Image: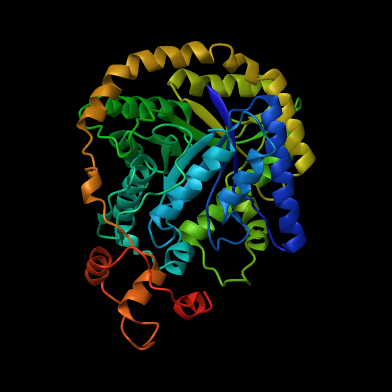
Amino acid sequence: MKFGIFFELSAPRPFSREVEWQVYHNALEQCRLADNLGFDHVWAVEHHFLEEYSHSSAPEVFLAACSQRTKNIRLGHGITLMPPGYNHPARVAERIATLDLISDGRVEFGTGESSAALELGGYGVEVGRKREMWAEATEQCANMMVMDPYPGFEGQFFSMPTRNVVPKPLQTPHPPIWVACSKRETIHMAARAGIGALTFAFIDPSDAVRWVGEYYDIIKSEACVPIGHAVNANIAMVTGFSCHEDEGEAFVRGAEGFQFFGYALGHHYIYGDQKPGRTNIWERFQAAKDSLPPMGPGANGGSGIGTPAQLRENLALFADAGVDQVIFIQQSGRNKHDHICASLELFAKEVMPVFKAGEAEREATKAAELAPYIEAALARKPRLASLSDDDIPTVYALGRQIAETGKDKDPDAPPASLGETVAIGRNSASQVPPTDPAAILGDD
């Protein structure tokens, strides 16, 4: 089984620019340490306007900084918001590919849609159609990273003409695709799409056995029709994290932060009310803390909180259930940076080696077992038709369009339509008439 660390980049009130600076720099140091210790993945979310809970609005920048401080750890978008209201699919393809190049091929392309009113409303994403938006944008983003040129697309939620989206990622055909899953039905959807399931649901190992079994049953069935150009058959599960030789101290150091993560998540997604820039979630959490489910020795505090012996026992249940990766939430609330680093070091020394020992053999066995099913799934994938060279349209420079339509002489003349522009280009000399560039382009 593999292990990852997960960042919301939480900053409870009262936060300031200096506090946010410290949160980011502590997180980068934790990534550097995790890489040195042999952790497999770092995951960073994309959230907007979710004060205190997550200040991670530009994960591509954070992960790019991680890429230059680390050598081996995989860099996971956990997740990229895919409805075009948040991000145009071509911009996502460009950012993912660029990060893959500068990290030497270490990107994991996590995707999702969000269920937070602050995000959806802020970007004008229609709640009832966000799943359809995710599917359309994710499929086309994968096409953009693979096709040369991308032939263009007229969709329900975005359209674009033929363009060659560059750069292309280092990994072929593209980085592994994942989707965030908080429900059992979404895990099934991930399997049908042939992508990894990032399960942000805190479940018991007994439930994990059933969820993992259902996921891989679908991967092996005819219901699996890949949304991308490769199948990423993996299931990861998130839990809290705090490791210390003393059980009580492990909970003292990590339980409150994990509680705040759950409380703030509920506030923004389920039951809260938020006045932007004014609501104090940390204050509300403190007032409600005693009424929340208990977290402490003997309580259900998360499979990643406890002593090394307890973590070995808890995590073995997930490994036996077939979970491919456990992802730890260690940076939340007021958890201290030095405590987090100490936990990572102790875990790497006394817990991780037990699970690393047979990982290469497990992966090889799994790959051999799934190979015929993945081949069959990829054969079922409907593919966007490539263009022949003769069918690739020519796009003429704006200066040439303006010069050849005479707009430099008549500023009020309407711009040429695409059809007119193409006709002008085909019927005119290849040399643009000499014109003052400033007159053509203005101040641009």
Across the whole image, how many numbered discs are drawn on residues? Answer: 0
In this picture, residue 2 sits left or right of residue 19: left
**Residue at coordinates 32% horizontally, 28% vertically from top-left?**
214
Q: How is the image coloured?
A: rainbow
> Residue 359 versus residue 89: which sits nearer the camera?
89
In this picture, residue 364 sits left or right of residue 217: right
Could you say where residue 130 lies in the image, as x and y percent from the top left? 34, 57
Could you say where residue 377 lies in the image, as x and y percent from the top left? 25, 28
Q: Quadrant of residue 222?
A: top left
> Residue 57 versus residue 140: which sits nearer the camera?
140
Could you say where residue 183 lies in the image, as x and y percent from the top left? 38, 42
The furthest residue to the right:
338
The answer to whether residue 106 is seen in the rendering is: yes
Could you say where residue 213 lies in the image, as x and y percent from the top left? 34, 24
**Residue at coordinates 23% horizontally, 66% vertically from top-left?**
427
Q: Is residue 426 above or below residue 200?
A: below
The answer to whether residue 300 is seen in the rendering is: no
Q: Quadrant of residue 157?
A: bottom left
**Residue at coordinates 69% horizontally, 44% vertically from top-left?**
27
**Residue at coordinates 52% horizontally, 68% vertically from top-left?**
273
Q: Is residue 82 above or below residue 354?
A: below
Q: Is residue 143 above or below residue 419?
A: above
Q: Quadrant of residue 419?
A: bottom left
In this picture, residue 172 sits left or right of residue 71: left
> Residue 67 versus residue 371: which sits nearer the camera?
67
